[in-house]
Amino acid sequence: MKPENITIPSHPVGMPLHRNRFDKTIWESRNLSNLGDIYISRLNEIIEKGYEILTKQIAGGAIVVDNEASFQLQFAYILKTIGELYKFSSDDLFTIELESKFSFTEGLQKSKSKNARIDVILTLGDSTNYATAAIELKFFKEKNHREPNNRYDVFLDLHNLENYKKGKLFDITLFILGTNHSHYVNQKDYSPLTTCFDFRDGAQYLAGTLLVYETDKPYGNPLRLENNYNFKWDVIEKKFNNTDNSNLYFLKLKV
């Protein structure tokens, strides 16, 4: 029951702004002033600072990441902490969702449907001007090596992110991969049957190039991306050497 003499705001405090994502009129009417660009800039800063802290804390041993789920949760905690500090006005609201379901007008190759489950969604702003971000994450451990399927899955995530961007529901679309396996970073060569799935340091993908899994039983269907990509890895030396590779590798791509 609503207490008497208390005004409920038009957008409930703590409710993600993108809960209105299926109402196209709301999305079309947002960011009617330059505040939208300001929120996009702030949200980019939050992600950049969060990424820097995440990678350094993993390398330094402050946090332990054993799989993709823990990678996602640790990053989300850092983003939440930083995001709260970027609420500069009493009207500002920062929200974060994990594994959030979305529906799109076009089919997605990853889910083979019009539905997607996005790893991390961020929103920063007020009720009428706000920025949104969709982030897909991967974390590959050397001991759980899925070669070459992991490489295909990276390009599949990029394909999905391009579709998220086309849907015009997100201002920022980002892919982040972490690994302790140099195979993805500086391997000398790959099998000719899957060599096109290449995101090693310094590699490039040219928009429109068809990516084909040419094995007898392909892991996935051919892919074609719409953007150019230059792959540049961040290499961070671990503070404490152990049985794992002494370096950690991180790839961050804006889509």
Image (cartoon, rainbow, N blue to C red):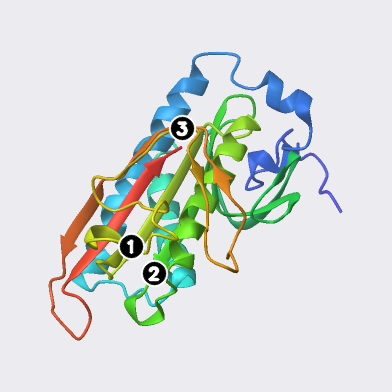
Q: Which residue is mark 2?
A: 140
Helix, strand or loop under label 1: loop
List x then y, in percent, for residue 247.
18, 68
List x then y, in percent, for residue 130.
56, 29
- Please name whichever residue, 31 or 127, is drawn nearer the observer in this view of the structure: 31
- Please name whichever residue, 181 or 167, is drawn nearer the observer in this view of the structure: 181
As drawn, the label of residue 143 is none
- Report whether 225 appears left or right of 58: right
Identified by mark 3, the residue type is Ala
- Report whether 224 appears left or right of 251: right
Of the two numbered discs 2 and 3 on the same chain, state the one appearing first in sequence: 2
Residue drawn 46% across and 32% down?
Answer: 207
Residue drawn 87% across and 54% down?
Answer: 1
* Residue sitting at the far bottom: 243
Of the two numbered discs 2 and 1 on the same chain, state the one appearing first in sequence: 2
- Please name whichever residue, 4 or 168, is drawn nearer the observer in this view of the structure: 168
- Report whether 132 appears left or right of 16: left
Answer whether residue 84 is visible to the viewer in this image: no
As drawn, the label of residue 207 is 3
Judged by depth in the image, the label closer to the viewer, 2 or 3, is 3
Q: What is the C-alpha distance between the residues marked 2 and 1? A: 17 Å
| Above or below, comparing residue 138 to residue 33 in the picture | below
Q: Which residue is mark 1?
A: 190
